[in-house]
Amino acid sequence: MKFTAERSVLLKEITIAQEIISSKNAMSILSNIYLEADNDTLYIKATDIKVNFETKIPVIVQEPGTITVFGEKFLGILNSIPEGELEFEQNEMKIVIKPVSKKIRFQLKSIDSDKFPEFPAIGEGEFFEMPVKEFKDMIIQTVFAISDDETRYFMNGVFFEKQEDRIVMVATDGRRLAYIKKDAGNDIKDFTGIIIPPKILTIITKRAGDEGLISISVTDKIIFIRFGSYLLSSVLIEGQFPNYSKVIPEKQSFSFFINRLEMLDALKRVSLLVEQKSRRVYLGLEPGVISVSSEESELGVAKEEISCKYEGEKVSIALNYRYIEEPFKVINEDEISVHFTEPTRAITIKPIPEKDFFHIVMPMQLE
């Protein structure tokens, strides 16, 4: 194998490929990136067995061939080399890397490409499309609410389903819930609800642009996602996702309206003195004002008052400050409404004007 590639183009793709890899053992094929040069194209693959990544870039191929290289060192080499064209040449079980314009030479050992795992295949007709920006919005509004409790593995991902004329994403850790829906186009096929691991979703939010369409295909055990020159696939999480509709309040008696950035700033300051194990803050509501305060501790106490639109009785609600902060960060609107019935029951967070998503948070004990 022998080919010439532009360093900046190759570096971008190898950086993404290395994000997929979880093994750091140089002797493991799962630490390696698969390279195949043919027809002036370099095909790149990486996997951690559960998540697979494929892409391709234009190169000048002098001799076709395949090889796998240790991803961590390969990325380090590319990062260290100045901008410009690079020459790659396979020499038995090694690959030689040389910049065209510099007297630099790296020789990196490899593992036979025959040992690289086979990727699952999917037929072209199995994909449906939706705007990539809408899909990214769905991920951003939900992925942070995933549970990290491995004993409740069925909540370690985002639930994705089609409901008649809409598609829905939901995430929960048992104490909060994030929900978003989008209109389903006529071409979106019916599929049974699935649980998507966060790794593939995080890569999409980082690497997909905001223009164009994203293609999705769902099977019993795997999701395939394609955008631009990328094809990603991931094994799905097995198990029964909780019946989330039971925790969505049908009606809530009270509400208040608050500036999103003012609330985030108050939470940031008050959290400096919040006990980090419980992360409990108190929201004290009275007409026109909301106070955000920490528990009194050996370190001290913090309290801040900000204006809000509220006309009900005086009330205090205890909440995990991260469970308020995280939805406030992913909402883009300036003003937010918070709905509740009583201090011990779920609160609902929505943007103003209301959109196609909301967040539900369960209060903590006041003491």
Image: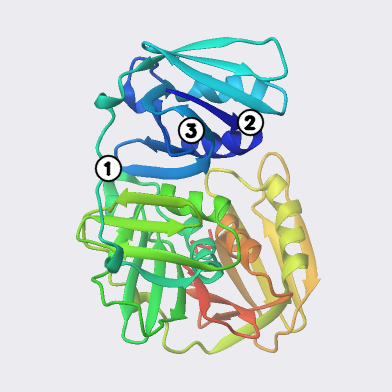
Q: Which residue is mark 1?
A: 119
**Quadrant housing residue 310:** bottom right
The Cα atoms of the two marked residues, 3 and 2, are separated by 16 Å
Q: What label sits on residue 356 in the rendered view?
A: none
Q: Amino acid at mark 3?
A: Gln
Q: Residues within 10 Å of mark 3 (few under 14, many from 20)?
A: many
Front: mark 1 or 2 = 2
Tell me which colouring the rendered structure shows: rainbow
- N-terminal of the two: label 1 or label 2? 2
The Cα atoms of the two marked residues, 3 and 1, are separated by 17 Å
Q: Which residue is mark 3?
A: 18
Q: Residues within 10 Å of mark 2 (few under 14, many from 20)?
A: some
Q: Is residue 151 above or below residue 69?
A: below
In the rendered picture of this protein, how many numbered marks are placed on residues?
Answer: 3
Front: mark 3 or 1 = 1
Q: Is residue 345 visible?
A: no
Label 1 element class: loop
Q: Is residue 306 visible?
A: yes
- Left or right of 331 on screen, residue 147: left
The Cα atoms of the two marked residues, 1 and 2, are separated by 27 Å
Seen at 65% across and 19% down, the residue is 99
Q: Amino acid at mark 1?
A: Phe
